[in-house]
């Protein structure tokens, strides 16, 4: 990972089985699995709901987030550390495979 680059997510797409594809401003795409975080409970527990997981997924604060309030308020979202998401498994663009 570059030390002078602050990871900036520009797009987040829900993947299968509680995963997210994160697209970064430098072109990197990562595949992040949230299943363990959801299973641990706490604030992430509400993302166990499949509809909420997919429909509330967005980009806020330049990172992967869930707008659980529906107001796009960065103070009330659930978000992930962009460095953690950036360090996840690097993948090719899954949207290029959609026909």
Image (tube, rainbow, N blue to C red):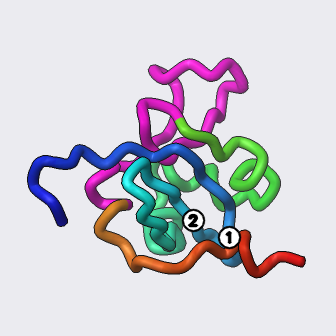
Real-space CA distance between mark 2 and mark 1, rounded to the nearest whole angstrom: 6 Å
Quadrant location of the N terminus? bottom left
Q: Residue furthest right?
A: 99
Residue 79 x %, y %: 45, 42
The answer to the question of whether label 2 and label 1 lie on touching residues, with beta carbons closer than 8 A, is yes
Quickly name the residue at label 2.
Answer: 21
Q: Residue at x 45, y 73 (%)?
A: 36
- Whole-percent x and y of residue 14? 68, 62
- Image point 58% across, 48% down: which residue? 11
**Up/down of 99 relative to 6, above or below:** below
Q: Nearer the viewer, residue 86 or 50?
A: 86
In-front residue for pair 88/70? 88
Compared with 61, 6 (above or below) is below
User: In the image, what residue occupies the spot 52% across and 24% down?
Assistant: 76
Tally the marks. Answer: 2
- Please, is residue 10 above or below residue 35 in the view? above
Residue 10 on the magenta segment: no
Left or right: 45 in relation to 4 = right
| Residue 80 appears left or right of 4 | right
- 94 vs 39, left or right, is right
Sooner in the amino-acid sequence: mark 2 or mark 1: 1
Hey, which quadrant is residue 92 in on the image? bottom right
Q: Can you identify the residue that label 1 sits on? A: 15
- Residue 58 against residue 86 in the figure, above or below: above
Circle on res. 37: none
Determine whether the residue tagged by mark 2 lies in a helix, strand or loop. Answer: strand
Query: Which stretch appears magenta?
Result: 60-85
Few, some or many residues within 10 Å of mark 1 (<14, 14–19, 20+)? some
Displayed quadrant of residue 16? bottom right
């Amino acid at each position: 990972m570059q030390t002078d680059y602050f990871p900036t997510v520009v797009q987040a797409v829900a993947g299968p089985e509680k995963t997210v594809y994160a697209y970064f401003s430098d072109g990197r795409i990562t595949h992040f699995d949230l299943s363990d975080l959801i299973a641990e409970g706490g604030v992430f527990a509400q993302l166990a709901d499949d509809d909420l997981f997919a429909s509330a997924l967005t980009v806020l604060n330049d990172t992967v987030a869930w707008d659980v309030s529906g107001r796009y308020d960065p103070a009330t979202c659930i978000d992930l550390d962009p460095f953690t998401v950036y360090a996840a498994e690097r993948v090719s663009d899954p949207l290029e495979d959609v026909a």
